[in-house]
Amino acid sequence: MREPYAFLLHETGGPEVLQSEPIAIPAPGPRQVLVRNEAIGLNFIDTYHRSGLYKVPLPTGLGNEGAGVVEAVGEGADEFRVGGRVGYFSGSLGAYATHRLVDAERLVKLPEAISFEDAAAAMLKGCTAEYLVERCARVQPDETVLVHAAAGGVGSILVPWLKHLGAVVIAHAGDSRKAALAKELGADHALCCPMEELAAEVRALTDGKGVPIVLDGVGKASWTASLSSVARRGLIVTYGNASGPVPPFTPLDLLSAGSIFVTRPTLADYCRTPEEIRASAARLFELIEKGVIKIRIGARFPLRDAAEAHRAIESRATTGSTVLIP
């Protein structure tokens, strides 16, 4: 049996603040389930919690997403059984651990066709893609959508999902290799130009109109390009801060851009109830099983090397999803 351990964040800062420590395996309380993690998803939001960009009370665990095996079930959590395959992507932090307690309301059962690694790589990013495309932007067939960071963890799921719905996808990526990957994923147009040139490229591809929808997980570095690329009365969905938070803007900026709409959503508000969590995951699993979404795991790190994994994702050295293996 492997020695149980977890990462507990005592101070915010760079990757060097990530240190593992031994833990006692906890017993589940009412409506709790003890999960032995088999794979853990690394997400950009983990770096926000670690750095202090997103404030959380310290000390704290780290990580939202994992998949594993049920080892014990608390009173009232009878929908789960010992030995069952489960995953989670919401709720309290603490996925960077060999074992952890998860509220039953936050757990989803994994179909046999979904591996632990694929689940850990896909759930948070895939359910983010689900709500962005189907419930937030409500993308319709033949609509043109600009996707930033199209070869990244969320972007590489957004592109084929959008194509499945019949959208026209303009993908933007940081270099030619990543743009080629976006093209392989189904993008109609895959660009890797500098941000200051992107709007002109997008306007050229859309007869000067711009795109009705921008899905922007980059933030600060892409904001001006997004604002300049969106069509009159279009929508910018700014859902991430990979380059830092979006700079301050005023309603007059939205007027000047063409009476546009901007929303800054978060997964926690779209997967808030057990019903929403399980419906979102079920939709994702459906598209994975149909082959619409192919989970690309670009890197695997031992959980104990979480600091190295953070350095890799922050340096843009990864594509697709990254998983940590206990």
Image (cartoon, helix red, strand yellow):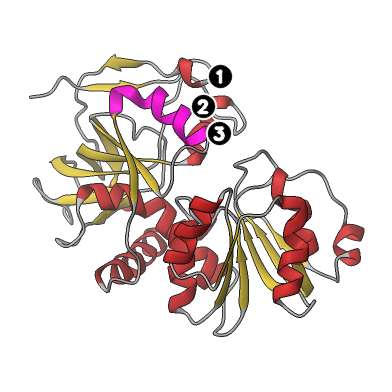
**Circle 3 residue:** 48
Q: Are discs 1 and 2 less than 8 Å apart at CB?
A: yes
Is residue 305 shown in magenta?
A: yes
Q: Residue at x 59, y 26 (%)?
A: 52
Q: Are discs 2 and 3 less than 8 Å apart at CB?
A: yes
Drawn side of residue 123 relative to residue 75, left or right: right
Element under disc 2: helix
Q: Quadrant of the C terminus?
A: top left
Q: Position of residue 63 (x, y in %)?
A: 40, 35
Is 280 in front, or is 57?
Answer: 280
Which disc number belongs to residue 50?
Answer: 2
- Cα separation, mark 2 vs mark 3, equals 5 Å
Question: Which of the 4 image quarters holds residue 290?
Answer: bottom left
Amino acid type, mark 3: Tyr
Q: Residue at x 37, y 48 (%)?
A: 89
Lower sequence index among marks 1 and 2: 1
Q: Residue at x 53, y 33 (%)?
A: 315
- Cα separation, mark 1 vs mark 2, equals 6 Å
Element under disc 3: helix
Q: Is residue 140 above or below residue 194?
A: below
Which residue range is magenta in the image? 303-314
Which disc number belongs to residue 13?
Answer: 1
Q: Are discs 1 and 3 less than 8 Å apart at CB?
A: no
Amino acid type, mark 2: Arg
